[in-house]
């Protein structure tokens, strides 16, 4: 039986500057010297970065069966761009005494020098492939940092519209009024003290029941509504996304709340992402409270991290579209979602609404709430957790009963809130743009000071004089802005605290979780030592 000669041709994509499969085959035929037993193998639309190609696999099976004597390709990178794959392939060729011919490079695998040169050529072929990948990656991140639409699913609440950004034709998001109204309802419902993902879903369900777009079969959903519960991932009739989107569910509502594409990014949003370890691409001056945000994985990000929760090393880019949710509302929902996730993993103590707030002034450890049964009553008291360690801290040196401490903190909360008077919404709206402007300038000053300090190590005497004067000037401007900010912030706290005042009058009626939320807003922590106690307020 006569052995066959194989001609192998591959083309990943059709491009003007790429050679077609037909042309490759015609050039390879010239190396066959009019042989009769020729078999042609063609892989179109497959990359050379690996060997997962149907025609290549068929050719290798034929080689293993002992029917092949020679393989001809137009160029080396047509058969492989991987050093490892090519090495394995050549070992198999050698084992079955199969010659390899590259028409362009003119390699002769029958000699040691030919095999060595062949391996060197493969190294350069792989280098070319990796260089192309690097260029594609560079282009992707360069375009993403400019706010161009990079493809993918369009977020709920938006549709795509053609746009020109910096002379480049691309697309940008434009709000869908009907869907944006649902987005706002989700945020407003979830931001309520008692708001949950389920309640946000029920709110949409109730709104849909009042429209004529409701699906015919809603008996199950009405029963769910009557029971005041929505199962996880329960979908809402009538909320099926237009243009072929998946229905809304509690999981998608969580995704919507996390997504910064909706927020009107201002300086508070800037500081939030900065505090979470994200890499902010735009200068702080761009956070003026109008545009949304694109959040990217980041080039050096860890692919194993849960990207939906972990913001460290994520890249934050100001998007060209306008945001639809105010920063205060978006941040309240985003932070609440983060806290709820933490509570679901490590549940907060349910014995007192002050759990986690009380610290020991002597050792710095937190006070624990201990519960013990007395003769007739159930006693709760705080004990320094440092007592369990080698320091054997005695804490305050006496028993701190939980009921007494809770009552004292409640009275102090009431005293603090009574100091505030009502501040109108109109006054708050007038202060917000000024306040945001001050914050942006302060952040810009801090960045400039940081850059100047980095130059100190290599600075000469003349440069040091300039650095000292400039830092002094910037620091003076920063202190003046902080004084103005302090005045506005104190007035703003009056307004925020006034919203909470009503809760203190109905304190005994509140659930434990609601008391914890109020304490989280008002109090940073409480320090207790021997014969002394101090409350550190957030207001």
Image (cartoon, rainbow, N blue to C red):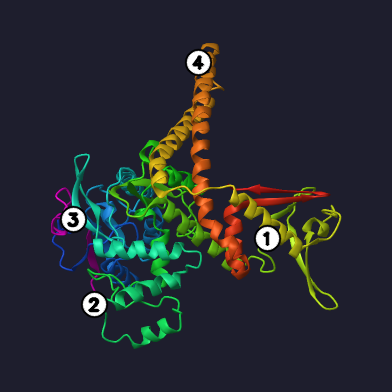
Mark with earlier residue (1, 4): 1
Which numbered tag is attached to residue 185? none
Of callouts 2 and 1, the N-terminal one: 2
Q: Nearer the viewer, mark 4 or mark 3?
A: 4
Task: Give the extent of the magenta segment.
Answer: 1-28
Can you give x and y, in whole percent of width and height, for residue 204 in the image?
Answer: 35, 72
Circle nearer the N terminus (4, 3): 3
Q: Please give the residue where the numbered disc 1 appears in the rendered image.
A: 354
Assess whether mark 3 and mark 1 are in contact (beta carbons under 8 angstroms).
no
Q: Residue at x 43, y 39 (%)?
A: 435
- The residue beneath circle 2 is 213
Q: Which mark is residue 466?
A: 4
Magenta stretch holds residue 22: yes
Q: Mark 3 and mark 2: span between their CA atoms?
A: 70 Å
Give the distance between the C-alpha atoms of the residues marked 1 and 3, in whole angstroms.
85 Å
Under tag 1, what secondary structure? loop
Query: From the viewer's perspective, is the residue at label 3 or at label 2 nearer?
Result: 2
Where is 505 relative to 265, above or below?
below
Q: Which mark is residue 31?
A: 3
Q: Which of the two labelled residues, at mark 3 and mark 2, occupies the earlier sequence position?
A: 3
Task: Check residue 475 for magenta coloring.
Answer: no
Query: In the picture provided, is 359 more to the left or to the right than 298?
Result: right
Which residue is rendered at x = 80% and y = 55% of the image? 386
Quick one: 75 or 185, which is closer to the camera?
185
Percent from the top left, x then y, of residue 202?
40, 75
Disc 1 and disc 4: Cα gap in Å? Answer: 51 Å
**Helix or strand or loop: what does disc 3 sit on?**
loop
The quadrant of the picture occupied by the N terminus is: bottom left
| Mark 2 surroundings within 10 Å by alpha-carbon count, few (fewer than 14), some (14 through 19), many (20 or more) | few
Secondary-structure class at tag 4? helix
């Amino acid at each position: 039986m006569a052995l066959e000669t194989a001609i192998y041709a591959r083309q990943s994509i059709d491009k003007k500057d790429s050679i077609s499969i037909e042309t490759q085959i015609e050039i390879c035929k010239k190396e066959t010297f009019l042989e009769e037993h020729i078999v042609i193998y063609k892989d179109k639309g497959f990359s050379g970065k690996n060997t997962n190609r149907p025609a290549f696999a068929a050719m290798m099976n034929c080689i293993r069966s002992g029917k092949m004597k020679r393989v001809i390709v137009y160029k080396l990178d047509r058969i492989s761009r991987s050093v490892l794959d090519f090495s394995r392939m050549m070992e198999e060729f050698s084992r079955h005494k199969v010659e390899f011919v590259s028409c362009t490079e003119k390699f002769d695998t029958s000699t040691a020098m030919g095999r060595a040169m062949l391996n060197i050529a493969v190294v350069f072929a792989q280098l070319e492939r990796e260089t192309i990948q690097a260029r594609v990656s560079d282009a992707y991140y360069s375009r993403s940092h400019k706010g161009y639409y990079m493809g993918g699913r369009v977020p709920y609440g938006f549709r795509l519209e053609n746009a020109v950004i910096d002379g480049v034709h691309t697309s940008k998001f434009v709000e869908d009024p009907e869907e944006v109204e649902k987005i706002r309802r989700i945020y407003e419902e979830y931001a309520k003290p008692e708001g949950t993902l389920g309640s946000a879903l029920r709110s949409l369900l109730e709104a849909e029941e009042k429209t004529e777009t409701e699906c015919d079969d809603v008996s199950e959903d009405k029963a769910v509504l009557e029971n005041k519960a929505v199962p996880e991932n329960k979908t809402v009739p009538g909320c099926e996304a237009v243009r072929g989107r998946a229905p809304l569910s509690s999981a998608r509502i969580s995704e919507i709340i996390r997504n910064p594409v909706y927020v009107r990014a201002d300086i508070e949003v800037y500081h939030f992402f900065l505090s979470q370890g994200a890499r902010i691409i735009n200068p702080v001056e761009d956070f003026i409270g109008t545009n949304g945000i694109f959040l990217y994985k980041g080039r050096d990000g860890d692919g194993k991290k849960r990207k939906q929760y972990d913001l460290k090393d994520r890249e934050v880019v100001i998007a060209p579209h306008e945001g639809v949710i105010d920063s205060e509302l978006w941040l309240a929902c985003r932070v609440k979602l983060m806290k709820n996730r933490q509570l679901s993993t490590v549940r907060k103590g349910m014995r007192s609404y002050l759990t986690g707030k009380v610290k020991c002034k002597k050792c710095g450890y937190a006070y624990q709430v201990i519960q013990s049964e007395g003769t007739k009553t159930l006693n709760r008291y705080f004990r320094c957790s440092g007592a369990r360690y080698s320091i054997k801290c005695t804490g305050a040196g006496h028993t701190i009963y939980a009921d007494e401490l809770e009552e004292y903190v409640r009275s102090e909360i009431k005293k603090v809130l009574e100091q505030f008077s009502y501040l109108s919404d109109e006054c708050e709206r007038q202060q917000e743009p000024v306040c945001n402007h001050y914050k942006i300038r302060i952040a810009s000053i801090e960045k400039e000071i940081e850059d100047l300090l980095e130059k100190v190590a290599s600075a000469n005497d003349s440069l040091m004089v300039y650095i000292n004067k400039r830092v002094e000037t910037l620091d003076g401007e920063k202190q003046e802005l902080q004084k103005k900010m302090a005045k506005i912030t104190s007035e703003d706290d009056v307004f925020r605290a006034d919203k909470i005042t009503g809760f203190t009058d109905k304190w005994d009626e509140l659930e434990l979780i609601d008391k914890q939320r109020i304490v989280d807003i008002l109090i940073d922590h409480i320090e207790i030592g021997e014969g002394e106690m101090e409350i550190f307020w957030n207001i």
